[in-house]
Image (cartoon, grey):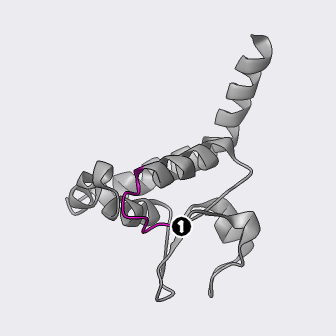
C-alpha cells in the first residue's frame, strides 16, 4: 500500500490498516520512500492511494480501498458491497471527494489545535 506520508489523514489510515492487518499481508509504504511502480508516475501516487500486488498489478483510489479491504477482517463487507451495481461508481465518487479534500482536513485539524 503506497500512501502519502506527508498527509496526516493518509498516515492515520495507514496505521489503522497496520493495526487491523491480522495476517500481516499488507506493507504500508509512504510514497516518498518508494519508486513508482511500472506504468505509474509520482503524480499518480500523490493523487491517490495505490496498492501494488506481488505480481506487479496495481489498483488505485477506490479499487485500492477494495483490495485492502479484502485482506482486513474488519472491512470484509466492502468487497461484497462493491459487487452491487452502482457501488463502484459511488465508491469512486466518495474516494475522489475525500482524497481531494485531505489537505483541507489536515488544515482544519491544525487550525483547531492552534485555537485550543
Percent x, y of residue 61: 50, 62
Residue 63, image x and y in percent? 41, 66
Question: Tag 1's secondary structure?
Answer: loop
Magenta-highlighted residues: 20-26
In the picture shown, does residue 108 fall above or below 99? Answer: above
Which secondary structure is most common in the magenta stretch?
loop
Taking the image as shown, residue 81 lies to the left or right of residue 98, namely left
Queried whether the magenta region covers residue 21, the answer comes back as yes
Q: Is residue 19 left or right of residue 77?
A: right
Position of 89 with respect to 29 (left or right) is left
Quadrant assignment, res 42: bottom right
Near-viewer residue (27 or 57): 27
Q: Residue at x 70, y 54 (%)?
A: 5
* Residue 91 position within the rendered picture, expressed as x and y whole percent measured from the top left: 38, 53
103 in the magenta segment = no
Decide: is 26 above or below 10.
Answer: below
Mark 1 crowdedness (10 Å alpha carbons): few <14, some 14-19, many ≥20: some
Which residue in the rendered view is the most extreme toward the right?
114
Name the residue rendered at 56%, 61% in the picture: 49
Which residue is most to the top? Answer: 116
Q: Position of residue 70 (x, y in %)?
A: 32, 64
How many marks do you count on the picture? 1
**Residue, disc 1:** 27
Image quadrant holding the C terminus, namely top right
Horizontal arrangement in the rendering, residue 89 relative to residue 97 (left or right): left
Residue sitting at the far front: 23
Q: Residue at x 47, y 66 (%)?
A: 26
Residue 109 higher or lower than 69, as above or below? above
Quadrant where the N terminus sits is: bottom right
Amino acid at each position: 500500500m503506497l500512501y502519502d506520508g506527508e498527509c496526516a489523514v493518509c498516515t492515520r489510515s495507514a496505521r489503522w490498516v497496520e493495526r487491523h492487518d491480522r495476517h500481516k499481508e499488507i506493507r504500508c509504504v509512504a510514497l516518498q520512500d518508494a519508486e513508482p511502480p511500472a506504468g505509474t508516475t509520482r503524480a499518480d501516487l500523490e493523487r491517490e492511494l495505490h496498492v501494488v500486488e506481488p505480481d506487479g498489478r496495481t489498483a488505485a483510489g477506490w479499487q485500492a480501498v477494495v483490495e485492502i479491504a479484502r485482506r482486513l477482517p474488519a472491512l470484509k463487507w466492502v468487497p461484497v458491497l462493491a459487487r452491487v451495481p452502482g457501488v463502484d461508481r459511488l465508491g469512486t465518487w466518495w474516494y475522489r471527494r475525500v482524497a481531494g479534500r485531505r489537505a483541507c482536513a489536515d488544515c482544519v485539524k491544525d487550525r483547531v489545535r492552534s485555537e485550543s
